[in-house]
């Protein structure tokens, strides 16, 4: 939530576009509360914003695994007991994987067009799901990832509807720090103001 808020605050065009893209689904009284999860999952731009924030700012920049038996990785021998480190931060910012704009915030990479209609693209242009490791994969992946995404979707949609966002001290980028989790260096102050409630 922290980093999606930071992205909204630093990209002035982002919040109006996000608010407009969700308006037709979120600002109607058609029993949406009964199916809010499915509705939010189907909003391309909202999902694009969330997936880009998760791609650029994975909670854990580094993950460790230990080989439980002798094995091989990419042709290299890995003896039992060897510690193996992988970095979602580096993989998810690799130009070899994500192209020349790998370090840019581009929600549209998670959107595809079918018959003139925007749809959620869960691949984001990836050739392999191992290119997106925010929650890892396999039997030891993050068991709370679906809840985290649902929570992030609900909060982002609700807060974007009612508030405008700006960095308290505008800057070209937000420096990061931390090895266990990624945090803004020196903290992050946002200026939040209310907007007219177009739902009424």
Image (cartoon, grey):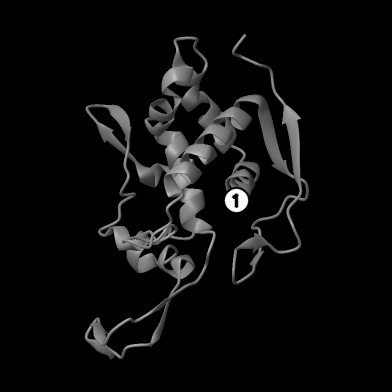
Given residues 15 and 200, the one toward you in this image is: 200
Residue in view at x 48 percent, y 19 percent: 33
Classify residue 101 as left or right of residue 118: right
Classify residue 164 as left or right of residue 50: right
The quarter of the displayed image where residue 34 is located:
top left
Residue 92: x and y in percent read 42, 62
Task: Name above or below for residue 182 compared with residue 115.
Answer: below
Q: In the rendered image, is residue 33 in sight? A: yes
Task: Name above or below for residue 128 compared with residue 3.
Answer: below
Q: Quadrant of the C terminus?
A: top right
Residue 95: x and y in percent read 39, 66
Q: In the rendered image, is residue 105 in sight? A: no
Residue 65: x and y in percent read 41, 76
Circle 1 is placed at which residue position? 3
Task: Name above or below for residue 40 compared with residue 56.
Answer: above
How many residues crowd around disc 1 within 10 Å: few (fewer than 14), some, or many (20 or more)? many
| SS for dot 1 | helix
Residue in view at x 29 percent, y 27 percent: 117
């Amino acid at each position: 939530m922290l980093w999606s808020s930071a992205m909204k605050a630093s990209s002035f065009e982002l919040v109006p576009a996000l608010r407009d893209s969700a308006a037709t689904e979120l600002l109607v009284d058609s029993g949406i509360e009964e199916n809010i999860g499915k509705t939010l999952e189907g909003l391309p731009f909202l999902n694009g914003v969330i997936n880009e924030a998760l791609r650029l700012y994975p909670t854990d920049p580094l993950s460790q695994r230990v080989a439980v038996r002798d094995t091989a990785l990419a042709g290299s021998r890995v003896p039992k007991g060897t510690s193996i480190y992988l970095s979602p931060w580096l993989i998810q910012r690799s130009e070899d994987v994500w192209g020349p704009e790998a370090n840019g915030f581009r929600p549209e990479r998670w959107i595809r067009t079918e018959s003139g209609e925007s749809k959620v693209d869960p691949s984001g242009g990836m050739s392999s799901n191992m290119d997106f490791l925010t929650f890892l994969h396999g039997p030891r992946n993050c068991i709370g990832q679906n809840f985290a995404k649902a929570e992030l979707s609900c909060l982002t949609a609700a807060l974007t509807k009612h508030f405008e966002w700006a960095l308290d001290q505008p800057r070209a980028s937000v420096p990061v720090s931390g090895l266990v989790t990624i945090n803004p260096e020196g903290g992050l102050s946002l200026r939040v103001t209310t907007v007219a409630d177009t739902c009424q």
